[in-house]
Amino acid sequence: MAGEAPPLYLAPGVAKRGREQVVEIVVGALTPLVGATMARSSTQGLCAKHGLSGPALDARQLDALVAALEPGLNVFVGRDRARAVLASIRRAVDGLPEGA
């Protein structure tokens, strides 16, 4: 839509990324910071809370997931480190092949 900011996570022209692959990237990025159990349960819980249950996530859904991750991550590791982790997730998600 006109006037909306471009998606944060997907390269121009890329429609979707596989949800399970995105979850694995997020869990992998969070595990060193909060442990594997907390990383997986918080990521899966946020996906469920925000209705991210389909086989693929579009840019808006990815933005919602990362926006939901940010506040908790800020508490655990601080704002600067959280931004760095979220940026690494963005780069990894952009590197995924399109689709489910």
Image (cartoon, rainbow, N blue to C red):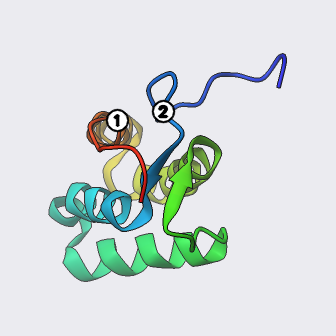
Q: Is residue 3 above or below residue 35?
A: above
Label 2 crowd (10 A; few <14 / some 14-19 / many >=20): some
Q: Position of residue 91 (x, y in %)?
A: 29, 33
Q: Which mark is residue 14?
A: 2
Q: Viewer-proximal residue, 77 or 50?
A: 50
Residue topped by disc 1:
94
- Quadrant in which residue 49 is drawn: bottom right
- Quadrant in which residue 92 is drawn: top left
Marks 1, 2: nearer the viewer: 2
Of the two numbered discs 1 and 2 on the same chain, state the one appearing first in sequence: 2
Is 58 on the left-hand or right-hand side of 4? left
In the displayed orientation, state which residue is furthest to the top: 3
Q: Is residue 73 above or below residue 63?
A: below
Q: Is residue 20 above or below residue 29?
A: below
Secondary element at tag 2: loop
* Picture residue at 51% right of the left edge, 78% below the top: 45
Q: Amino acid at mark 1?
A: Asp
Disc 1, disc 2: CB below 8 Å?
A: yes
Q: Position of residue 86 (x, y in %)?
A: 37, 41
Q: Is residue 17 above or below residue 6?
A: below
Q: Amino acid at mark 2?
A: Val
* Picture residue at 38% right of the left edge, 35% below the top: 83
Q: CA distance from mark 1 to mark 2?
A: 9 Å
Q: Viewer-proximal residue, 54 or 74?
A: 54
Q: Position of residue 75 (x, y in %)?
A: 43, 56
